[in-house]
Amino acid sequence: MPRMKKAFAAMSAAAVLTASAAGPAAAATQTQDGLVNVAVGDITIARDVNVAAVVDVVAQVCGTNVGPVTALATQVDATGTATAMCTAGGQTVRIVQNA
């Protein structure tokens, strides 16, 4: 369980940094290009996070290489089709496109 708490903290920090860097110009646009959500089980723990920021955290939580996560996250962003990355703490870790 401590691993999930660390992952959540890292994703939250990445989301805050990404949101603060985006500024008001990003809020005015409806385009979600390059942004995805990360869900663990039924809970979305990171919304509208840059694909690059999500990749390292999800790869670490899932114990996999960054390359495959980058490819899948980019595919989710482009197609809108959610993908399950792994199971951690008994919950499925998924990358989904913002609706």
Image: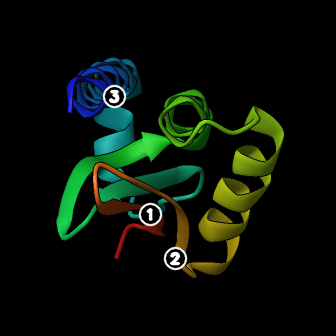
**Which image quarter is the C terminus in?**
bottom left
Q: Mark 2 or 3 closer to N-term?
A: 3
Q: What number of labels is visible?
A: 3
Q: Position of residue 36 (x, y in %)?
A: 46, 55
Q: Nearer the viewer, mark 2 or mark 3?
A: 3
Q: Secondary structure at mark 2?
A: loop
Q: Earlier in the sequence, mark 2 or mark 1?
A: 2
Distance in Å between CA atoms under marks 2 and 1? 7 Å
For the residues labelled 2 and 3, say whether their Cβ atoms are less than 8 Å apart. Answer: no
Label 2 neighbour load within 10 Å: few <14, some 14-19, many 20+ = many
What element does badge 3 sit on?
Answer: helix
**What is the secondary structure assignment of the residue under circle 1?**
strand
Residue 98 x/y as whole percent: 38, 67
Label 3: how many Cα within 10 Å (few below 14, some 14–19, many 20+): some
What residue is drawn where x is 29% and y is 49%? 89
Q: Name the quadrant containing residue 52.
A: top right
Q: Position of residue 46 (x, y in %)?
A: 28, 45
Residue beneath disc 2: 82
Amino acid tagged 1: Arg
Q: Nearer the viewer, residue 68 or 12?
A: 68
Establish if 85 lies above or below 15.
below
**Closer to us: mark 2 or mark 1?**
1
Q: Residue at x 38, y 41 (%)?
A: 26
User: In the drawing, does residue 3 fall left or right of residue 68?
Assistant: left
What residue appears at the point 69 percent right and 39 percent down from the top-left corner? 64
The residue that mark 1 highlights is 94
Mark 3 to mark 1 CA distance (whole Å): 13 Å
**50 to the left or right of 34:** left
Of label 3 and label 1, which has the lower sequence position?
Answer: 3
Residue at the spot of label 3 = 7
Task: Identify the colour scheme used.
Answer: rainbow
